[in-house]
Amino acid sequence: MQVSITGRHVDLTDPLKNYVQEKLQHLKHSFDHVLDVHVVLSVEKFRQRCEISIQTNGLNIHASHETEDMYASIDGVIDKLNRQLKRYRQKLRKHHADQGQRNAPQVRVSRRTLAYSDTDEELHEDQQPDTIAQTQMYAKPMSVDEAIMQLELSGQDELVFTNQENEQINVLYRRPDGSFNCIEPEAAS
């Protein structure tokens, strides 16, 4: 397990680092496939915040907690992560018990972020906007409930997945009000 600890406006003392490492070891015992952990400790006035991002095999989990004491913030975020991992394991067990494992192929999806021009000029037909960033991911087969859980755990705003019910690519995203929308393709009539 690779652990990186970053401090923003806080001195990373050895006791503080050891405390974080000790708490993360308890987390590793409850979930074996942890690959990478990034911890950010920050202080703003009286608020002391701990954020932890965990990358596992096919799962990204993010949690944060804020109190007036850094040690309490660390304990709070570890408790949140334990609850999330417990809920994830229970859903996986229930899913495998209900449907069994499905061997649907994973589809590779590419997402591009395009540069937007503030000018009023129209683009010529042969002119394409510049690509700022491009990421590739696998649209894993999962149910909509699993996709919502994955989106909540990852802290991202959208997720592309293969719906197990109809084996089509779906997009799940979080709306500004906190609710979720799922985009499913329909046959053209």
Image (spheres, rainbow, N blue to C red):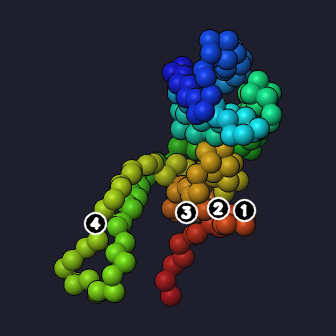
Residue 12: x and y in percent read 60, 20
Q: Which amino acid type is shown beneath numbered disc 3?
A: Asn
Q: Which mark is residue 178?
A: 1
Distance, label 4 to label 1, CA atoms, is 31 Å
Callout 3: SS:
strand
Q: Residue at x 67, y 66 (%)?
A: 176
| Label 3 crowd (10 A; few <14 / some 14-19 / many >=20) | some
Q: Is residue 163 at least partly visible in the picture?
A: no
Amino acid, disc 1: Gly
Q: Which one is earlier in the sequence, the residue at label 2 or at label 4?
A: 4
Residue at screen point 67% across, 53% down: 148
Q: Is disc 2 in contact with disc 1, using a CB cutoff of under 8 Å?
A: yes
**Mark 2 falls on what kind of element?**
strand
Q: Are marks 3 and 1 in contact (CB under 8 Å)?
A: no
Task: Give the label on residue 174, or none.
Answer: 2
Instruction: Name which residue type carries label 4.
Output: Asp
